[in-house]
Image (spheres, rainbow, N blue to C red):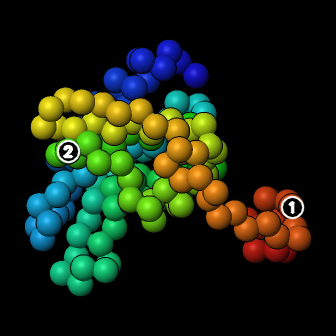
């Protein structure tokens, strides 16, 4: 992995850019997020709200799902940019935990004051739920148990 400071700057810039595409007419709370895999590939996302509020999707999950649907199975860093630097919601923390470990870095930047907080996923979500199946083969699992 490249220098952590350089990675942080790169990911926060990308998250800031992604935030411009947020669709948040109801809350007005625009979020941009990116995830980065072990090879340095970066996937971005913005929050997408819906008139039926419960269908709203967070920027973090949009970014992660883009990565996973491109074949990524392990992420090493996440960057989120919001108005006030809020960390990912509880649902996103659990979804991130599926493809990350306790050491995965999460940078959260505030557009209001430029402050950046650094967290590890294990701090934000201790005791993440992990389902252990009888089949330990991830490949087998991905093929629907075939
Ligand atoms: Zn969320």
- Camera-near label (2 vs 1) is 2
- From this viewpoint, is residue 73 visible? yes
Q: Quadrant of residue 131?
A: bottom right
| 143 relative to 100, above or below | below
In the displayed structure image, the side of residue 139 where residue 128 appears, left or right:
left
Q: Quadrant of residue 11?
A: top left
Residue 136: which disc? 1
- From this viewpoint, is residue 14 visible? no
Give whichever of 21, 134 is nearer the camera: 134
Q: What residue does disc 2 label? A: 84
Residue 113 in the image, given as x and y percentages of width and height: 15, 32
Q: Are there few (<14), some (14-19), or many (20+) residues within 10 Å of tag 1?
A: few
In the displayed structure image, the side of residue 71 where residue 8 appears, left or right:
left
Q: Quadrant of the C terminus?
A: bottom right
Residue 95 in the image, given as x and y percentages of width and height: 53, 61
Residue 46 in the image, given as x and y percentages of width and height: 28, 54
Residue 55 in the image, given as x and y percentages of width and height: 32, 78
Q: Quadrant of the N terminus?
A: top right
Give whichever of 87, 2 is nearer the camera: 87
Q: Are there few (<14), some (14-19), or many (20+) residues within 10 Å of tag 2?
A: some
Q: CA distance from mark 2 to mark 1?
A: 41 Å
In the displayed structure image, the side of residue 17 where residue 42 appears, left or right:
right
Task: Identify the residue shown where x is 17% and y is 57%.
Answer: 29
């Amino acid at each position: 992995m490249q220098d952590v400071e350089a990675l942080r700057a790169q990911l926060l810039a990308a998250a800031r850019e992604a935030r411009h595409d947020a669709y948040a007419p109801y809350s007005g709370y625009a979020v941009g997020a990116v995830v980065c895999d072990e090879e340095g590939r970066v996937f971005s996302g913005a929050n997408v709200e819906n008139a039926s509020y419960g269908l709203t999707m967070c920027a973090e999950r949009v970014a992660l799902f883009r990565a996973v649907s491109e074949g990524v199975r392990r992420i090493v860093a996440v960057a989120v940019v919001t108005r006030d630097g809020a960390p990912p919601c509880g649902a996103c923390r659990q979804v991130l935990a599926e493809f990350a470990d306790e050491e995965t870095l999460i940078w959260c930047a505030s557009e209001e004051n430029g402050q950046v907080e650094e967290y590890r996923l294990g701090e934000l979500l201790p005791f993440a739920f992990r389902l252990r199946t009888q089949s330990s083969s991830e490949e087998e699992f991905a093929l629907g148990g075939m």
